[in-house]
Image: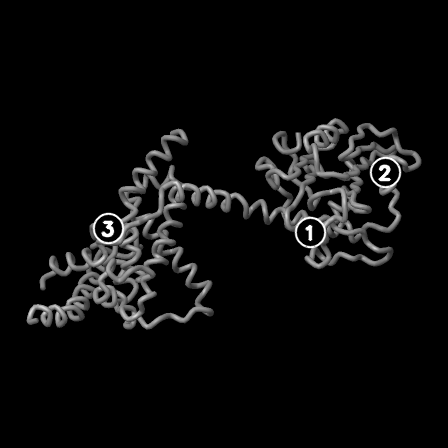
């Protein structure tokens, strides 16, 4: 495979997967600017290892996993300098998303950020990337049953968080 | 609200988020990633070799005969002389190298190889040829100090190499190392360089336009000829 071919394949992959990967990482970490940078970095790493990544059964999952790992590494480096915001206050922080509020529903993002990290990752892979349970389990390195359990708890928590607001909206 | 409705709500909450980064930017960043992957091993090796080079300088006694270059009594006529560097083969087998400017590394390399020295010379290009494998840091520094003594004066670098001290399968690498600098001349009786610490490393005062270091590498056809 020549360089030109490799770049063409990568470009096609990037154009087709970039938005979904960004949304998945955003759902996982809640910070849009950070998500953009992590996804860019992950795609850059994918390009650098494209020969191997292109043969991955779910390269978009590889990108998301790489982005999340990069985020964890950054957090470990910065954790002593940067306080972790209260997840419950995410919706009240205009700068938290780093983007106009209209791009992301703040209520749902706040509810997502109240979930444990692993549940957010499961939601991101299952609902945003639309991976099946087995692939999600493989990407996260956990058992399929654990994926189902995390997803069930996440859905229940989201429903609990969002249902009253929805009912109120419907009444008004 | 059933699971399907909730899933749709979550998806739609971020549906307006799009990646705006051009693919060309990603590829450019990918090239940087690949460069970073190549650099750590080489950089670590350079630190090691630079450290050993510093140690050699610290051990260099003042007035070492090799510093006299081609004017040293008993030396053979200069086998090659260019503005940027000179190479002289001494009667005892030592090779004296005087480097005034970091230019024409290929010429210096071929000249030294013609004198029988397995060597790789790199100035202002890749830090160290990918074909070269530095000797691990666990190797004793005295091997390098026996092979090469490194000194600077008046903006030139002087390198005295004893090919007979080279262990079998070992070669010499002479290279510029951005960020390090040529070790300064030691004062008599006072080693001015302490185990490669940055304060003891200075830029050359004139002539040489960049830092310079010497180290040992595994000899191979691709690396040292």
The mark found on residue B69 in the picture is: 2
Left or right: residue A156 compared with residue A14: left
The mark found on residue A129 in the picture is: 3
Kind of element beneath mark 2: helix
Residue at left 29%, top 62%?
A: A118
Q: Quadrant of residue A31?
A: bottom left
Instruction: Check disc 1: other Cα within 10 Å, few if <14, some if 14-19, many if 20+.
Output: many
What residue is disc 1 on? Answer: B51
What's the distance in space between the residues labelled 2 and 1, CA to CA? Answer: 24 Å
Same chain shared by disc 1 and disc 3: no
Kind of element beneath mark 1: helix
What's the distance in space between the residues labelled 3 and 2, CA to CA? Answer: 69 Å
Q: Residue B126: where, in percent of width, then height?
A: 59, 39
Instruction: Check disc 3: other Cα within 10 Å, few if <14, some if 14-19, many if 20+.
Output: many
Look at the image and tell me in which quarter the N terminus of chain A lies: top left
Residue at left 44%, top 63%?
A: A76
Kind of element beneath mark 3: loop
């Amino acid at each position: 495979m020549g360089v030109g071919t490799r770049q063409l394949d990568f470009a096609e992959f990037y154009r087709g997967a970039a938005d979904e990967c960004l949304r998945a990482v955003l759902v996982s970490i809640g910070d849009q600017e950070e998500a953009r940078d992590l996804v860019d970095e992950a795609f850059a790493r994918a390009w650098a290892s494209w020969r191997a990544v292109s043969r991955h059964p779910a390269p978009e999952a590889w990108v998301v996993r790489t982005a999340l790992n990069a985020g964890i590494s950054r957090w470990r480096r910065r954790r002593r300098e940067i306080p972790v915001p209260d997840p419950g206050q995410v919706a009240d922080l205009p700068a938290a998303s780093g983007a106009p509020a209209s791009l992301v529903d703040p209520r749902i993002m706040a509810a997502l950020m109240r979930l444990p990290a692993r549940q957010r990752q499961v939601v991101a892979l299952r609902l945003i990337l639309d991976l099946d349970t087995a692939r999600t389990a493989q990407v996260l390195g956990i058992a399929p049953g654990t994926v189902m359990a995390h997803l069930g708890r996440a859905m229940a928590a989201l429903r609990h968080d969002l249902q009253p607001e929805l009912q109120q909206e419907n009444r008004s | 609200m059933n699971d399907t409705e909730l899933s749709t709500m979550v998806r739609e909450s971020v549906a307006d988020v799009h990646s705006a980064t051009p693919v060309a930017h990603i590829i450019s960043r990918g090239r940087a990633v690949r460069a970073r992957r190549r650099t750590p091993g080489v950089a670590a090796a350079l630190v090691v070799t630079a450290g050993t080079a510093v140690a050699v300088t610290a051990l260099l006694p003042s007035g070492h005969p090799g510093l006299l270059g081609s004017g040293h009594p008993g030396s053979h006529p200069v086998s090659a002389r260019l503005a940027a560097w000179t190479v002289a083969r001494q009667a005892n087998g030592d090779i004296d190298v005087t480097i005034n400017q970091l230019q024409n590394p290929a010429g210096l390399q071929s000249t030294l190889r013609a004198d029988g020295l397995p060597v790789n010379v790199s100035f202002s290009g890749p830090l160290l040829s990918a074909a070269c494998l530095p000797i691990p840091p666990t190797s004793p520094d005295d091997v390098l100090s026996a092979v090469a003594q490194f000194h600077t004066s008046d903006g030139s670098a002087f390198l005295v190499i004893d090919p007979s001290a080279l262990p079998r399968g070992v070669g010499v690498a002479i290279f510029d190392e951005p960020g390090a600098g040529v070790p300064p001349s030691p004062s008599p009786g006072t080693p001015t360089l302490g185990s490669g610490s940055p304060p003891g490393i200075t830029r050359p005062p004139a002539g040489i336009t960049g830092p310079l270091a010497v180290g040992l590498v595994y000899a191979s056809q691709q690396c040292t000829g």
